[in-house]
Image: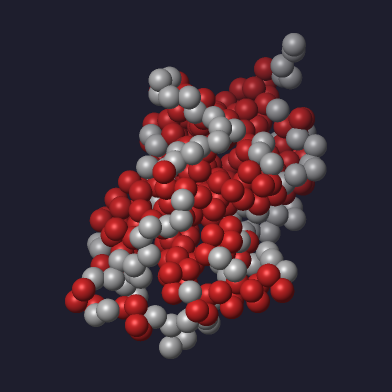
Amino acid sequence: MSTIQPKLSEPVSDELALVQAAKDGDVAAFEELVRRYDRNVFRIAQHITQNREDAEDVVQEAFLKAYGNLNQFQGQSKFYTWLVRIAVNEALMKLRRRRPERMVSLDEEVKTEEDSLPREVADWSPNPEQQYSQAELRDILTRTIQGLPASFRTVFVLRDVEGLSTEETAEALDLSIPAVKSRLLRARLQLRERLSRFFQRREKDGNGKSKIARGDGTQ
Amino acid sequence: MKCSEFLQELTNYLDGVIDERTKAELDDHLAWCHNCYVVCDTTKKTIEIYRDSQLYELPEDLRARLRSAIVSKCQAKKKAGPERV
C-alpha cells in the first residue's frame, strides 16, 4: 500500500528576508507573511475553537502577537511553525474561556473507549465521498472531527490537514515526538471508525470482502 | 505479527517512516490479514478525505477585512514605537 503523500508547500526561501524586513519595521513585508498563512491559521483556529467568530479573532490576535514579538523569533524553526504555536495557544485560550467547565489541555492523556482495536472493519465503497453532496460531506466531516478530544483533533489537523511534520507538530504544540505519534494514531483510527458509519460498502454493492485487493492495492 | 502490533506501526507505515525490514513484515501481515488491510486502507482514505476537504476555507472578503485590520494595527504599533516594559 502506498504511503500518504505530503502536501506540497510553497517555497519559503525568501521567508527569512521577509521576517527580517518586518523586524526592521516594514509592515508590507509582514503583510506578505499574513497573506501567506492567514488561511492556514484560520483553519487551525476553527478546528480548535469550533467557532467561526473565535477563529476570526484568533487570526487577528495571533498575527498581532507575532508582529509584536518578532524579535523573539530567532529563526531556528520555520516562521510558520512559530506562528502556528502562537495561534494554537490563542485558540486554546478561546476554547477554555468558552468551555470553562471542561479542562482543555494538550498534555492530558485522553483515554477513550475507542482506543482498543478497531471494531468496525467493514470495507468502504470505492469512492465513498461521492455518495454524498458537497454540503452533506462537509457536514459529516465537520461533525466527525468535532467529536474528537481537542488534543487529538489538534494533532490531526496540524499533521494531516496542514501537512506539518511530526517534529514541527511537536514543536508547535510543545509535545514530545512520541506523544504526537500516539495522539495521531488514535485520532486517525477514531476518525476512520466514525466515518465508517457513513462510508461503508452497502449490501447492494455486493459482498466486498471477497473482492478486496490485497497487498499493493491492485486486483 | 499480531494485529495489535500492526496497528502500533500503522502511522509510521502510512507516513513511510519505517525501516525496510519492518515494512516487509507489515506488508506480509497485510497480505493475509483482511481486517488490517481494510483498516489500513480506510485510514489512508480518511486522511486523504480530510486533507482534500477544504473545510473552513476563509472567504476572500473576510480575508481582506482581517488583513487590513491586522495591517492597520501593526502600523499603529510601529508609530507608537517599541513597547517598553
Q: On the rendered image, what quadrant is the N terminus of chain A found in?
A: bottom right
Give me the residue at 51% from left, 50% from top. A186
Give me the residue at 64% from left, 74% from top. B25
Residue B12 shows in this picture: yes
Q: Position of residue A149 (x, y in %)?
A: 45, 39
The mark total stands at 0
Q: Position of residue A84 (x, y in %)?
A: 61, 40
Give me the residue at 43% from left, 61% from top. B46
Give me the residue at 80% from left, 37% from top. A74
The quadrant holding residue A63 is: top right
Quick one: which residue is furthest to the left in this view? A204
Quick one: which residue is furthest to the front in this view? B2
Q: Position of residue A49 (x, y in %)?
A: 44, 34
Quick one: which residue is furthest to the bottom in this view? A219
Front in this rendered view, residue A11 or A179: A179
Front in this rendered view, residue A104 or A163: A104
Q: Position of residue A132 (x, y in %)?
A: 25, 63
Left or right, residue A106 beside residue A68 = left
